[in-house]
Image: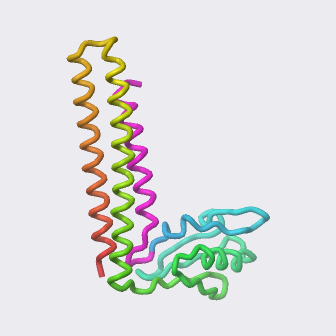
Amino acid sequence: MTFEDELKKVMQTAVEHLKGELKGLRTSRANPAVLDVVRAEVYGTQMKLKELANLTIPEPRQLLISPFDQNNLAPISKAIEKANLNLQPRIDGQVIRITFPPMDEALRKEIAKQCKKYGEAAKVAIRDIRGKSMKNAKKDEKAISEDECKKEEKKIQEFTDSFCKEIDILVTNKEKEILEI
């Protein structure tokens, strides 16, 4: 694996982590990814909801959870309540319904702020990677010519700029989605 491929892979990991965090942020629509952090105590162990049930969106503001085993209805419902996501699960026969209440402006702004915070943390991670790569390039300067070292540093900066730009786009798009009424 070349130096550039390795650098891209590490920086892409930071962007993928950000995408995962942004998926979990609540918007005005129902989103099963909000429940990715929820773990229910069943069969003597903590399990993700995706492993225990089907998650569907029958309406824009409603999430339907259909457990594979009906005995898990109560533990899943309790786990969602304990997760402190401001969601009220309601057991309805053999399914759990979660209605996403409309968000007021203050809540939307607060979640948008959190979105920006995640984006900034991802940029810091990218810059840390840049810093380490620049140090390595300077160490390699003894083995390679100064011109080659400058080319490496320029490449590192180009990757940093492109990944930071990608992060900005992801955050801006998510903010629009959050602030949408």
Q: Position of residue 93 (x, y in %)?
A: 66, 87
Residue interval drawn in magenta: 1-30
Verify whether residue 13 appears in magenta: yes
Quarter of the figure with residue 132:
top left
Dominant SS of magenta comes to helix
Q: Residue at x 49, y 69 (%)?
A: 34
Q: What residue is shown at x 67% (from left), y 70% (from top)?
A: 68
Q: Quadrant of the C terminus?
A: bottom left
- Residue depicted at 33% across the width and 42% down the height: 127
- Vertical placement of residue 17 versus 44, above or below: above
Q: In x, y percent, where is residue 105?
A: 32, 83
- Along the horizontal axis of the image, is 127 left or right of 55? left
Rendered view: 132 above or below 16 = above
- Residue 30, percent across and down? 44, 76
Q: Quadrant of the N terminus?
A: top left
Q: Is residue 10 magenta?
A: yes
Q: Is residue 48 left or right of residue 116?
A: right
**Residue at 45% across, 57% down:** 20
> Is 66 drawn above or below residue 8 in the view shown?
below
In the image, farthest residue toward the right? 44
Front position in the image: 128 or 65: 128
Quadrant in the picture for residue 119: bottom left
161 vs 26, nearest the viewer:
161
